[in-house]
Image (spheres, rainbow, N blue to C red):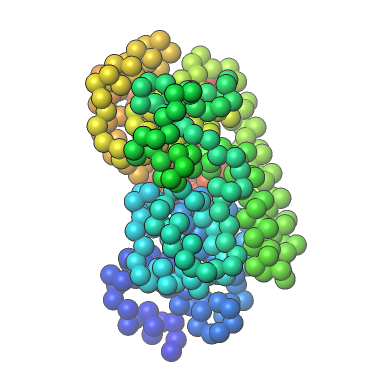
Amino acid sequence: MSVMNVRRHIPTAVLAGASVLGMLTLSACSDSGGGKADGKLNVTASFYPMEFLAKEIGKDHVQVTDLTKPGTEPHDLELSPRQIADLGESDAIVYLKGVQPAVDKAVQQSGVQHTVDAASLTELKKHGSEVDGHDHTTGDNGTGHDEHGHEGHEGHDHGGDGNDPHIWLDPVKLAQVAKGVGKTLADADPAHQADYARNTDDLVKKLDDLNKKFEDGLKNKKSDTFITTHAAFGYLAERYGLTEEAINGIDPESGDVSGSRMKELQKLAKDHHVNTVFFETLTSPAMAKTLAKDLGVQTAVLDPIEGITEKSQGKDYVQVMEANLAALQKALGAK
């Protein structure tokens, strides 16, 4: 049966629900050649940053399927039975443990040999412990969190260990992850090992250049503190000597903000000359707008790049990071 016929007999809702995964795996697995009917490595990525790595490193040798549809908040992802079944047919899986519990469980049960967890390729830290106003995600102390032991708070911890999974927002950390992804693709497809190595080097260079842009662009700043709706930017803050103050914790949807937290944010906005409250593209800006109104400051987008949509300020990770840099420069008065 041709791929078109197969596709026609599947209800549209199922295809929509399974994102592109169902289609890609149907086309890739239509013979028994280890998922390589078209000669390509069938790679499943958990959400956009992992898809970006797989595509940049795999280029023409891979067919990449993203489990998270554009516009979906990755943390909320539920997998359909079809997606879970198809996951087991992948030649390689690139995911980030701690972001999507449904994916972590499915990957564990998939039995796929060539699986790479981005979180295991770089050092993780605890961020977003702002419940009592001490969200010290700064570049100064090197710890990325305070001494008050906040890792037990509900809603701040996707991974079960209290660590902040948002490593992709630090280009240096993403470059470390890229090297591990390159090795995994080469292990899964040894015939194209040299290409994967070369593509990995190219990507690492691109990420190094991005890191230098951030370093140079944030050197001469008037303020070092920025306010966001959720604590996604702890690693970025730490890398460039900034302090992130999050209205919510690591979880973008953790509900109401206490009156005392609002008072703290009002005080620090005044003390640190904060003129912008940042919101993001995939979650509601309502809270940021309310706080900004109370503080008499403006709002702007700082994108955690969990997915690319038509609202994104760029077509890929590097472009959106450059837009984030411009937004930070403006908010922090960097020349």
Q: Is residue 276 left or right of residue 127?
A: left
- Is residue 319 among what the camera can see? no
Q: Is residue 147 above or below residue 101?
A: above
x, y percent for residue 102: 39, 57
Work out whether residue 136 or residue 320 is closer to the camera in this orientation and state it.
136
Q: Is residue 295 left or right of residue 227?
A: left
**Which part of the image, by quadrant, shows the N terminus?**
bottom left
**Which part of the image, by quadrant, shows the C terminus?**
top right
At horizontal 24% and vertical 21% (from top left) the residue drawn is: 259
At horizontal 53% and vertical 35% (from top left) the residue drawn is: 125
Work out whether residue 7 or residue 189 is closer to the camera in this orientation and state it.
189
Q: Is residue 22 left or right of residue 216?
A: left
Q: Is residue 308 above or below residue 103?
A: above
- Is residue 117 among what the camera can see? yes
x, y percent for residue 104: 45, 56
Instruction: Determine the residue located farthest toward the top in the rendered image.
Output: 271
At horizontal 58% and vertical 17% (from top left) the residue drawn is: 220
Instruction: Determine the residue located farthest toward the right in the rendered image.
Output: 194
Work out whether residue 80 or residue 64 is closer to the camera in this orientation and state it.
80
Work out whether residue 208 or residue 157 is closer to the camera in this orientation and state it.
157
Numbered-mark total = 0
At horizontal 43% and vertical 34% (from top left) the residue drawn is: 151
